[in-house]
Structures are given as structure tokens and as C-alpha cells.
């Protein structure tokens, strides 16, 4: 009697009664059916339940670039991914301190803060052509924003009002510090 391994827990099983057929895409474009074996229903349920997708900084960057292209009326097939990924690689090798999250921040800075139209006809290539010129400006903006957030968190928002009696009436005077 032949044995198989459980796809989930990797235990050897002799009874191949619990299996599912799984579609496998081949390189030539055809679809092949493959049997996947499990030792119990729990392993089968665990294997077939949807996996939690962890979004990496690279995925966030490419998703944002894709959303920019889609908002301009491009289809997913029209996005020049080969050129974009080559430019990302080139930018990352030129500036070793830059990571994907910072690159995403620079692009968002260009689009949201500077309100640049990255799809202008005067730009040859993709939306990443001008990114190297705005890296330092975006870093300075980020540092200024962090300083402002720090100052805002340290600021005392309580009103300091002191009542001063002048004659028969009272007058409110704000307490000031220099």
C-alpha cells in the first residue's frame, strides 16, 4: 500500500481518502489537476482556509504606484512595470540609505504635498523620473513635520486666565509668559 504525506502537518498517511484536487498552472499555460492529501479534516480545513496577507513596504509602494496609474485611466496591463521596477532598483542603488517606505513617502510628498502631476507630457518615461530630485526635500519636510508634532504634543493647551479687579468691575486678563 502506498503512503503519502499530509500537505499541512507533513505526517505520513497510508489512507489517501481525504484529498482535494488543486489546479496547477504549468509554464506552457495549461492547467493540470493535482491531488493534495491530508491526514484529517482539520488539516484540510487549515490548509484550505484563506491565508492572511502581510503587506510589505514593497507591496505598499507598488500598490500606490498602481493606484496612481489607475486614477489616470491606465489599465493594469498598460502600466510599464519593467521600467518602474528597474527605476526603483536604480534609485535604491544610487541612495543606499533609502528604503521602500521612504521611496513611497517621497512619491506621496510629490503627489499630495507638492500636488505635482506626474503624468505630464513633459516627463519622459514613468512617474519615478523626478523622484531622485525630491528625496532630500521630502526628508526635510518629514523632519519638520516630526518637530512640529513634537512641539504640539509638548504644548500646554490649558487657558491661563487671571481675574483682575479694577474698581467695581472685574476684567479678565490672559496670563502671558515670555
Image (tube, rainbow, N blue to C red):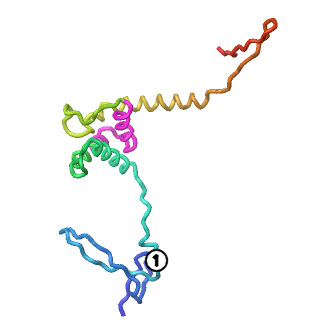
Please, is residue 26 above or below residue 63 in the view?
A: below
Q: Nearer the viewer, residue 51 or 8?
A: 51
Q: Nearer the viewer, residue 153 or 94?
A: 153
Query: Which residue is at a point 41% across and 53% down the rendered structure image?
Result: 55
Main SS of the magenta segment? Answer: helix
Return the x and y of residue 56 as percentages of the image width and height: 40, 52
> Which quadrant, please, contains the N terminus?
bottom left
Assess whether residue 57 is covered by the magenta stretch: no
Please, is residue 48 above or below residue 52 in the view?
A: below
Which stretch is magenta?
89-113
Q: Is residue 23 left or right of residue 6?
A: left
Q: Quadrant of residue 164?
A: top right
Return the x and y of residue 121 as percentages of the image width and height: 19, 33
Q: Quadrant of residue 54?
A: bottom left
As helix, strand or loop, the secondary structure at mark 1 comes to: helix
Query: Which residue is at a point 53% across and 31% down the rendered structure image?
Result: 149
Q: Is residue 16 left or right of residue 31?
A: right
> Which quadrant, please, contains the C terminus?
top right
Query: Which residue is at a point 46% across and 77% down the rendered structure image?
Result: 43
Q: Nearer the viewer, residue 147 or 49?
A: 49
Query: Which residue is at a point 24% across and 49% down the rendered structure image?
Result: 75
Return the x and y of residue 176 as percentages of the image width and height: 67, 15
Q: Is residue 155 left or right of residue 86?
A: right
The number of numbered discs placed on residues in the rendered structure image is 1
Q: Nearer the viewer, residue 84 or 1?
A: 84
Assess whether residue 93 is covered by the magenta stretch: yes
Residue at the bottom extreme, as displayed: 1
Label 1, residues with CA under 10 Å away: few <14, some 14-19, many ≥20: some
Q: Which residue corresponds to mark 1? A: 43
Amino acid at each position: 500500500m502506498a503512503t503519502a504525506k499530509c500537505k499541512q502537518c507533513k505526517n505520513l498517511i497510508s489512507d489517501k481518502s481525504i484529498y482535494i484536487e488543486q489546479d496547477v498552472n504549468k509554464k506552457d499555460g495549461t492547467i493540470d489537476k493535482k491531488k493534495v492529501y491530508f491526514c484529517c479534516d482539520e488539516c484540510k480545513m487549515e490548509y484550505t482556509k484563506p491565508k492572511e496577507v502581510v503587506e510589505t513596504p514593497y507591496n505598499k509602494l507598488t500598490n500606490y504606484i498602481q493606484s496612481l496609474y489607475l486614477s489616470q485611466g491606465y489599465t493594469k496591463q498598460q502600466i510599464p512595470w519593467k521600467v518602474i521596477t528597474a527605476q526603483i532598483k536604480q534609485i535604491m542603488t544610487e541612495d543606499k540609505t533609502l528604503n521602500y517606505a521612504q521611496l513611497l513617502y517621497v512619491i506621496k510628498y510629490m503627489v499630495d504635498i507638492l500636488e505635482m502631476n506626474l503624468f505630464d507630457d513633459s516627463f519622459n518615461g514613468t512617474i519615478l523620473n523626478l523622484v531622485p530630485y525630491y528625496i532630500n526635500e521630502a526628508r526635510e519636510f518629514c523632519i519638520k513635520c516630526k518637530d512640529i508634532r513634537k512641539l504640539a504634543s509638548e504644548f500646554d493647551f490649558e487657558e491661563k486666565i487671571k481675574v483682575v479687579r479694577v474698581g467695581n468691575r472685574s476684567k479678565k486678563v490672559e496670563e502671558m509668559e515670555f
